[in-house]
Image (cartoon, helix red, strand yellow):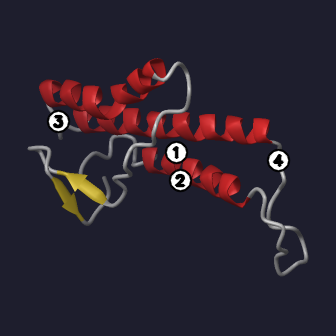
Amino acid sequence: MSGGYFEYNQHRVREIAEDIERLIATNDDETTNECGDRKGRGYSPEIIERFKEAVHTLNQAADMAQRVDWLVSDDDGPESFLRRWSSEVRCYWNDKLNSGGAEPEPKPKTRNHIHSFDGAIMHGGAE
């Protein structure tokens, strides 16, 4: 397992983003749970847009923390840190600018994948 400088808390940030995505997905669900409460919360489209912004920002923060984690844990050197920052983190900002502020396409999730030192993806452990 790589990294560890932040005790892998960047994964908790990504889990929060996933929890918010579930709130978005179930927002309009009219069915009831075992307690008889409506599953969906019925938030307005404006609120759901803010939730989408939160998901975007939280995923970006998790990616940023991951890159710093690998650098300070000596899993990446300065050159690979900068290369990965440009390809994995900076694309959020560039996508946002190029889309005129609209929500960019989501990045493919790499949860449960490990990038080896040469940049290849290996399936298995944490990122």
Q: Which residue is mark 3?
A: 76
Q: Which residue is mark 2?
A: 15
Where is residue 113? Give x, y as percent. 28, 58
Where is residue 89? Give x, y as percent. 35, 31
Where is residue 31? Give x, y as percent. 82, 73
Q: Residue furthest front?
A: 99
Q: Nearer the viewer, mark 4 or mark 3?
A: 4
101 horizontally vs 63: left or right: right
Which of disc 1 and disc 3 is earlier in sequence? 1
Q: Nearer the viewer, mark 2 or mark 3?
A: 2
Q: Are marks 3 and 1 in contact (CB under 8 Å)?
A: no
Callout 1, which amino acid? Val
Callout 3, which amino acid? Asp
Q: Are marks 1 and 2 in contact (CB under 8 Å)?
A: yes
Q: Quadrant of residue 71?
A: top left
Q: Residue 13 shows which numbered tag? A: 1
Which of disc 4 and disc 1 is earlier in sequence? 1
Q: Are marks 1 and 4 in contact (CB under 8 Å)?
A: no
